[in-house]
Each structure stands twice: as structure tokens, then as C-alpha cells.
Image (cartoon, rainbow, N blue to C red):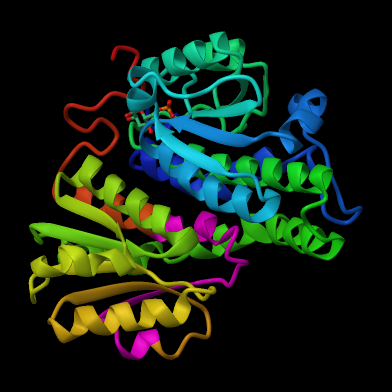
């Protein structure tokens, strides 16, 4: 087992550290930034249909649902197609309005999640086109999909999903870019810029991984907190949800992810000197707004742990702990900003003495409803 873990203490940590490679694998053969080309074989025959879709519905569970939320923002911005993101378990039972002209993107690491599988079977019967974004090759969801793209992250053993998530973000971004190009809703310049950004993501993720020791210290400082709040806006809002989910899953600490602006409608009531608040606050179009949200937390004596972009001087002057990651376009920034949150959850779980690879009550793949 020690060999299988490649020298790491746990599969989860091994998989977190594999990400520069697995993201590269998800891009390989598809993205050629130098030539300015993008090829996704699995959706080639459905491109015009995708570009002409009335709307896109993303169906998923758990971490894959969070990747879907990021994709909603990416696809709406790039393709100007309305996107809805649905929990598969809700979608399948509420007799949704769906049919021809709708494209469903099913996002699933395992490709076996029962709720997601049944949801797309029903939508397919009603005439929707199904696109699968799965990690496991030949899985049930991949097989019933009309088209799709694999994430190629390799086998994920740790129950808490990590490398599958970043591969999903990379592939969903590729799909958004490809459809935008087909539709003509993106300029050549922006297209090329985002290809270059994706091309540089693996090295930025590698840089974020170098923060491991620093994050372990932060974990030691806050591991006895009873609750955590995770906040972000825009592309980083789903990252906040994912950070909170990771912490809940493996450290059993109650954590809530929220859109930073929405906290004033509830969660802010919980803020006092005992509440660590993790801000995903990299530099993007929401930055100034997030700075005010941090001030609101500090005014109530909350402890702020902020994930910021290199060169930021404003937030570090306000936060209690600062985690600095490389700059990236806001569309792809979640792939980098989630890394410290995976590490934070990992170290808190380990410091508390839990089996982070097999958290209680959770299954890697939920094949019953
Ligand atoms: C389980 C796993 C999660 C995963 C979710 C969806 O809850 O523990 O890590 O995100 O299922 O799984 P899928 O394989 O469909 O992505």
C-alpha cells in the first residue's frame, strides 16, 4: 500500500500532488496553445448542435456539482447560452421541463452515481442530447451519453474528490471554448488568451502545491474550531463551496460555503472571534467587493484566512493568515485557488487523527439512491 501511495501518507495527498500532471493529461491532445487550436474528438459531431442549444443543463452530485457551477459561469460568459445547474437527485424527481433542443451535461468522476445516471436516462427519453464528462472510461454514464469528453485524471482512490475536480474544470473550460468558437461568441484574441492561460495552469498548480507546509501550519492553528465559513464570489463562489465540502468530508468540522455577498443575509450572525472565515479572494472582477466583505468580517472579529493573488498588498494587511497563489485569468483561477483548500482540509483531517482516505459514512461512488 505504501508503494501504491507513491511515498505519500495517504491517497488523498498523492492525488492532490498529482494535479499538475493530471490537468496536463486532461488537456493533452486537445489543447495546442502555440498553434491556437483546440480539438475535442468526443464532441466533434455535436458541435453545431451545442452551439445552437436553447439552453444547457448541467446535472451532477457532490464535488462534480461544484465543477458544474463553475462551468455555468464559464459557458454563459463564453457562449451566451443559458445554463442551469441541477442536483441530479432533485432533477430526476421533479418532472423537469426538458426535451429536444436541450443539451444536458452530466458531470461525474465515477460515471456510476445512481442519481445522475437515472436523471440523464429520463432526459434522454424526452429527447435531450446528453454529453458526459466522466473520469472513468467505459462507465455507465459515459456509455449512455450521446457524446462527451473524458477527464483523464486517472483512478481516484481517496473518497474526497480532488484531482477529478480540477480535471473537470479544465475539460468543461475546453468545451466552453470550443462551443464559443463554433458559435462565434468569443473573439480570436480572448480565445487565444484563454488557451495560453490553460496551457500555464499546470505550472501554477505546481506553485500552489509548494504552499503545503505553510498550509499545514494554518491547519494546526485552526483545527479545533467548531465551525468554518468559506466565502467567495463569481468564479470563486463554487470554490468556496468545494472548500467547505472538503473540510466537512474529512475533518468532520461543520463548514458552510456561501457567496460572499450573501453572508449578510444570514451567516454573518455566526461571526465572532472563534469563527475562521476562509476567503477565496484572488484578483478578479469581483476583487473590490470581496475586500469590503473581508472588512465586514474583521469588524465582527472573525478570523480571516485569505487565498490571494501574488502581489496583492491590500488583503494581506487585513487578513489573519494569507495564502498566496499565482495570478490566473478568473475563468481558470478556480483550478489554482482550490488547491490550498484541498490541502487545508487534508491537514486538518490528519491533525485530528482521522482516516482521510476513508471518511466515515461516505462512499467513493454512490450507486444507490
Ligand atoms: C460521492 C463522492 C464525492 C463525489 C460524489 C459524486 O459523494 O464521495 O466525492 O463528488 O459522490 O460522484 P461522481 O462520481 O458522480 O462525480
Can you tell which quarter of the image residue 51 is in?
top right
Q: Indicate whether 176 appears above or below 110.
A: below
Image quarter for ligand 1 equals top left
Quarter location, residue 213? bottom left
Could you tell me which residue is drawn at 57 percent across and 27 percent down? Answer: 104
Pinpoint residue 318: horizontal percent, then vertical percent: 30, 88
Looking at the image, residue 181 sits to the left or right of residue 253; the answer is right
| Residue at 37%, 52% in the rendered image | 342
- Judge from the rendering whether residue 28 lies leftward or rightward of residue 11; answer left or right: right
Q: Residue furthest right?
A: 35
Q: Residue at x 46, y 46 (%)?
A: 69
What's drawn in magenta, residue-wise?
A: 315-340
Please state which of residues 182 and 159 is positioned toward the viewer in this rendering: 182
Q: Nearer the viewer, residue 344 or 197?
A: 197
Quadrant location of the N terminus in the rendered image: top left
Spot occupied by residue 141 in the image (x, y as percentages of width and height): 53, 16
**Residue lying at 91% horizontally and 53% vertically, measured from the top left:** 35
Using residue 131 as the reference point, say whether residue 12 is left or right of it: left
Give the vertical position of 275 relative to 162 (above or below).
Answer: below
Relative placement, left or right, of 353 versus 133 is left
Amino acid at each position: 500500500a505504501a508503494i501504491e501511495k507513491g511515498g505519500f501518507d495517504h491517497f488523498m495527498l498523492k492525488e492532490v500532488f498529482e494535479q499538475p500532471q493530471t490537468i496536463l493529461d486532461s488537456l493533452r491532445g486537445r489543447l495546442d496553445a502555440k498553434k491556437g487550436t483546440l480539438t475535442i474528438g468526443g464532441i466533434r459531431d455535436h458541435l453545431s448542435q451545442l452551439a445552437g442549444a436553447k439552453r444547457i443543463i448541467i446535472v451532477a452530485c457532490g464535488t462534480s456539482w461544484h465543477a458544474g457551477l463553475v462551468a455555468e459561469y464559464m459557458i454563459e460568459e463564453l457562449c451566451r447560452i443559458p445554463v442551469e445547474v441541477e442536483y441530479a437527485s432533485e432533477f430526476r424527481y421533479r418532472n423537469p421541463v426538458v426535451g429536444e433542443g436541450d443539451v444536458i451535461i452530466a458531470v461525474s468522476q465515477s460515471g456510476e452515481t445512481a442519481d445522475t445516471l437515472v436523471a440523464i436516462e429520463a432526459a434522454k427519453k424526452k429527447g435531450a442530447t446528453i454529453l458526459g464528462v466522466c473520469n472513468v472510461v467505459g462507465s455507465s454514464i459515459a456509455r449512455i451519453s450521446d457524446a462527451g469528453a473524458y477527464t483523464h485524471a486517472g483512478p481516484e482512490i481517496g473518497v474526497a474528490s480532488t484531482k477529478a475536480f480540477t480535471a473537470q474544470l479544465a475539460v468543461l473550460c475546453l468545451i466552453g471554448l470550443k462551443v464559443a468558437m463554433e458559435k462565434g461568441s468569443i473573439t480570436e484574441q480572448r480565445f487565444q488568451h484563454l488557451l495560453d492561460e490553460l496551457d500555464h495552469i499546470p505550472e501554477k498548480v505546481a506553485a500552489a502545491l509548494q504552499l503545503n507546509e505553510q498550509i499545514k501550519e494554518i491547519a494546526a492553528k485552526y483545527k479545533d474550531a467548531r465551525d468554518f465559513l468559506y466565502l467567495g464570489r463569481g468564479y470563486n463562489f463554487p470554490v468556496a463551496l468545494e472548500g467547505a465540502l472538503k473540510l466537512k468530508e474529512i475533518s468532520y468540522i461543520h463548514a458552510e460555503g456561501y457567496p460572499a455577498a450573501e453572508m449578510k443575509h444570514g451567516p454573518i450572525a455566526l461571526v465572532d472571534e472563534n469563527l475562521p472565515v476562509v476567503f477565496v479572494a484572488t484578483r478578479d472582477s469581483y476583487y473590490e467587493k470581496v475586500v469590503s466583505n473581508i472588512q465586514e468580517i474583521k469588524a465582527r472579529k472573525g478570523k480571516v484566512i485569505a487565498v490571494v493573488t501574488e502581489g496583492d498588498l491590500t488583503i494581506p494587511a487585513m487578513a489573519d493568515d494569507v495564502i498566496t497563489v499565482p495570478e490566473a485569468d478568473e475563468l481558470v483561477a478556480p483550478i489554482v485557488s482550490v488547491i490550498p483548500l484541498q490541502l487545508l482540509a487534508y491537514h486538518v483531517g490528519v491533525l485530528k487523527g482521522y482516516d482521510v482516505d476513508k471518511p466515515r459514512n461516505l462512499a467513493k461512488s454512490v450507486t444507490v439512491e
